[in-house]
Amino acid sequence: MITRYEVNETNDMIENENLDVRTITLGISLLDCADSSLEGTKQKIYNKITDVAKDLVSTGKSIEKKYSIPIVNKRISVTPISLVGSSCCKSPEDFVSLAHTLDEAAGKVGVNFIGGYSALVAKGMTEADRMLIESYPKALHETKLVCGSVNLASTKTGINMDAVGLMGKVILDVAKISEDTDSGDCMKLVVFCNAPDDNPFMAGAFHGVTEPDAVINVGVSGPGVVKTALEKVRGESFEILCETIKKTAFKVTRVGQLVAKEASSMMGIPFGIVDLSLAPTPAVGDSVADILKEIGLEEAGAPGTTAALALLNDQVKKGGVMASSYVGGLSGAFIPVSEDAGMIRAAESGAITIEKLEAMTCVCSVGLDMVAIPGDVSASTVSGIIADEMAIGMVNQKTTACRLIPAYGKKVGDKVEFGGLFGYAPVMPVNTHSCEDFISRGGRIPAPIHSFKN
């Protein structure tokens, strides 16, 4: 039985502590849309998305009204488009045409973003994969709602260094073509190691090939809720600290479970997972970095930061898995720079560096997320940063990612402005010693020895 106290407590979380459901993401399989003709594929994609997702936005609004729970985004993820377009696309421009179709369909049903303009190339690239990757600058620049991702590595297969090298060049091209928006198109592109098939968060969402025809995935948030809870146990032992985080994560996840079940029932589409990641925003009081401060650090980046983040991540997961039988996606703590007021502050003051963020990747949900770097870096430097992140994920058997923003025309100390949930970020310095000879070797870094568990 839910008590009056628990109802009031949840209401207070929503009204005063920035608790929200960050996204309802509808995953849609487009495998049955593949056609030998480009126009045929485009028509099937448009028809399926606009049919299956026609009630998604209205369902989200109905749940918001019924339970007074903010649902910030309604999104769609689709089958990686490199697979869907492999038979009909003969050039990068053909893939751009599919991106326009995705954008039009997403606009028609009224969602905030559509993810899945993606390729899975951990072990090798098909010609379709290569063409899609080469299409990113134009495809992301000419569309508003399309997000893309590339899985470059996995614990089982190693790191595809040919693809890593290509992505370094492509990310710089994406940055240059969107220089008038502070290279903002880079926000819509992320690279992964061990990308999950059921991630509801952009820009990395895609509908995995093992998923059903359609599925509802929900991503919750709540850094502000965790921080407020920890304010009440300042100075207490680690045991009490951990218990507080677990109990709070349980409550936050139950909200996500409620929304997911309700959306599934209303739309007649199976419930997939709840992703219980702590997803921050630029709003004051909604920061993962501020949770780390509440745990006992003067600022995110101080000695002890990685240990504090490891503790936070682990307790969030322990609390969340008790609240839902189907926890998936990324599930942990995001540490984006531009989307977190506390991380912005830490980066501006020099308390946190790219190297420290890389170390934190070992224990967080993603990695180098929404990090602005100078626009004059070399493609090999971008690839080298990506390779480091991929290696962390591969060896530690976890998901890692990079969403880098080489801010074209900007130098260290400048700011890039994105607005809304994306916030702003200082341009951070990178190590400029060359790794060109390393990246240019090509081929594949083999999987680690502990990957062989068959």
Image (cartoon, rainbow, N blue to C red):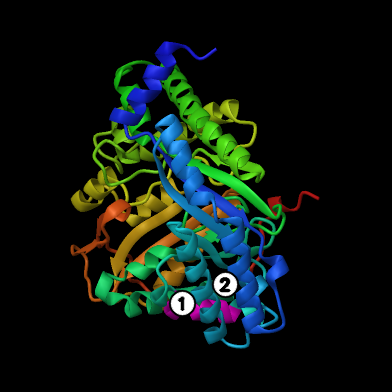
Residue 416 horizontal side relative to residue 291, left or right: left
Query: Circle 1 sits in a helix, a strand or a loop, which is it?
Result: helix
Q: In the image, which residues are magenta?
A: 130-139
Comparing labels 1 and 2, the label whose residue is closer to the camera? 1
Mark 1 neighbour density, 10 Å: few (under 14) some (14–19) many (20 or more): many
Tell me the kind of residue under disc 2: Met
From this viewpoint, is residue 177 visible? yes
Q: Camera-side residue: 329 or 274?
A: 274
Q: Is residue 407 magenta?
A: no
Rendering coords of residue 145 (x, y %): 43, 65
Residue 253 horizontal side relative to residue 196, left or right: left
Q: Camera-side residue: 258 or 334?
A: 258
Q: Which residue is mark 1?
A: 139
Rendering coords of residue 119 (x, y %): 60, 69
Tell me the kind of residue under disc 1: Ala
Q: Name the outermost residue toward the right.
A: 454
From this viewpoint, is residue 190 visible? no
Q: Counting residues from the N terminus, which is met first, the one under dot 1 or under dot 2?
A: 1
Q: Main secondary structure of the magenta part?
A: helix
Give the number of callouts: 2
The residue at the point 36 percent across, 77 percent down is: 378
Rendering coords of residue 141 (x, y %): 39, 76
The residue at the point 27 percent across, 35 percent down is: 285
Q: Camera-side residue: 367 or 113?
A: 113
Which quadrant: the N terminus? top right
Q: Is residue 138 magenta?
A: yes
The residue at the point 56 percent across, 35 percent down is: 262
Occupied quadrant, residue 328: top right
Q: Which residue is mark 2?
A: 161
Rendering coords of residue 225 (x, y %): 36, 29
